[in-house]
Image: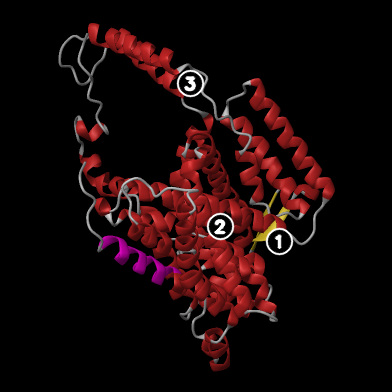
Amino acid sequence: MAGPIQVPKSDRDLNPTAADKVLAPFQRFMRFEAGGGVLLIACALIAMIWVNSGGSASYIELFYTSKVTIGFGEWSLSKPFILWINDLLMAVFFLLVGLEIKREVLVGELRSPRKAALPIAAAIGGMAIPGTIYAIVNMGHASGSGWGVPMATDIAFALGVLALCGSRVPISVRIFLTSLAIVDDLGALLIIAIFYTESIGVKYLGYAGALLALMAILNAMGVRRVLVYLLLGAVVWYFVLKSGVHATIAGVLVAMTIPAKTRVDQRRYSDFVRSMLERFDADSKGDHRAWTTGTQQSAVLAIEDAGHKVETPVRRLEHALIPWVAFLILPVFALANAGVSITGGGDEEATESIWSSRAMWGVVLGLLVGKPVGVFGFAWIAQKLGIGVLPEGASWRHVFGAAWLSGIGFTMALFIANLAFSDAADLDAAKLGVLGASVVAGVIGLCVLITGPKPQSA
């Protein structure tokens, strides 16, 4: 039998062209784990500079004033650009979140009760303590509605910062932080659905429920074409939007209907691929880089088809969405939502109002005190009670650093702030608190982790 075939990472490994060399830095950045976070930060900074410069009127005109209309007749929707971003594009983000939750529950860390206990306890603490701190700071004030803002963790930013630590942090810490953030996202979704939905249109919600039931039936019947679910999911999104429930919830509901099982037995797949590789090698005519025989092409196509069948639709869709979410949807969301006037538009009274705002300080204290105390404290209690166990190879210093990284609230926190505040001044103050606290939490978390001892090699 022929030896194992070394599959190149890309065409550049075989015969790099001039175009490959030009595009290589961009492709490396796209594969860099923190790349999406870097772009997110850049868009947030652009938004801040834009709003606090002489061009602030154009920012407001683009995102808040001008309307975009899609559809026709009574089926048409006309919304400002920012609402299309927050309602439609973010529904795609929540679809990805739903796929990640489903995968983790079925085959990931959240499948094992023993392993899941620590991140679940940490996530509960990381939601309860920040929300309580915010509620205390804003007790008796209209800004009290924003208690959900400091409860959220931005998984993209947190993992991006963690990636900067390199080999100083065990991979188990990444798994712990990912699991924590996924449970955190699930909590945020429940908060949005229950507490930030003003009214419910039962008729439209019934339509959405009927379509979701149909999608579940299609799943049970073995329909695996992702496009079918996405087309029906778009209609579900419309009905959820019209029902009054926030439209992004549709993304998670649709994710739950996507098939998560493979069509091909793993052993049969392995045996089939080996037989095709043997056929490929047997028909080799020498070291030809440009041409393959018809038999070899047939073997390659058969392996490709088998790989498509053995991969689950959930995983395939998740992989397809990740670059779109990381490098387009979240940066556009940041550009549209991070524009906060630090100077109050030159009005001294407005500036003073922002910096003395209870909403801002509630968010800051929630993220910088509540998050690390809640995450670390509840994880410690769970371990002492024997409910959960520390991640393999990790120390309490690693958990403490991850607890600080969970204080990076950016995307989800800004999203909830838009739902929580009707007063523009409170909204701007809360956004400023989210941005400032997220930066501080990220820096402290990075310092805690990167200054720790390197894990011992096994």
Q: Which residue occupies the foreground of this view, 430 or 375?
A: 375
Q: Which secondary structure type mostly characterizes the magenta part of the structure?
A: helix
Q: Is residue 126 above or below residue 458?
A: below
Residue 385 located left or right of residue 270: right
The residue type indicated by label 1 comes to: Phe
Discs 3/1, front: 1
Element marked by disc 3:
helix
Q: Is residue 306 above or below residue 294?
A: below
Discs 2/1, front: 2
Query: How is the structure coloured here?
Result: secondary structure
Quadrant containing the N terminus in the rendered view: top left
- Numbered mark located on residue 195 in the image: 1
Give the x, y percent position of residue 154: 48, 58
The answer to whether mark 2 and mark 3 are in CB contact below 8 A is no
Can the viewer see residue 204 in this picture?
yes
Can the viewer see residue 62 in this picture?
no
Element marked by disc 1:
helix
Q: Which residues are magenta?
A: 438-450
The residue type indicated by label 3 comes to: Lys
Discs 2/3, front: 2
Which residue does the numbered mark 2 point to in the structure image?
A: 124
Residue 250 located left or right of residue 284: right
Callout 2 crowding tier (Cα within 10 Å): few <14, some 14–19, many ≥20:
many
* Magenta run includes residue 162: no
The residue type indicated by label 2 comes to: Ile
* Magenta run includes residue 446: yes
Which residue does the numbered mark 3 point to in the structure image?
A: 309
x 20%, y 29%: residue: 14
Residue 268 located left or right of residue 129: left
Residue 401 located left or right of residue 98: left
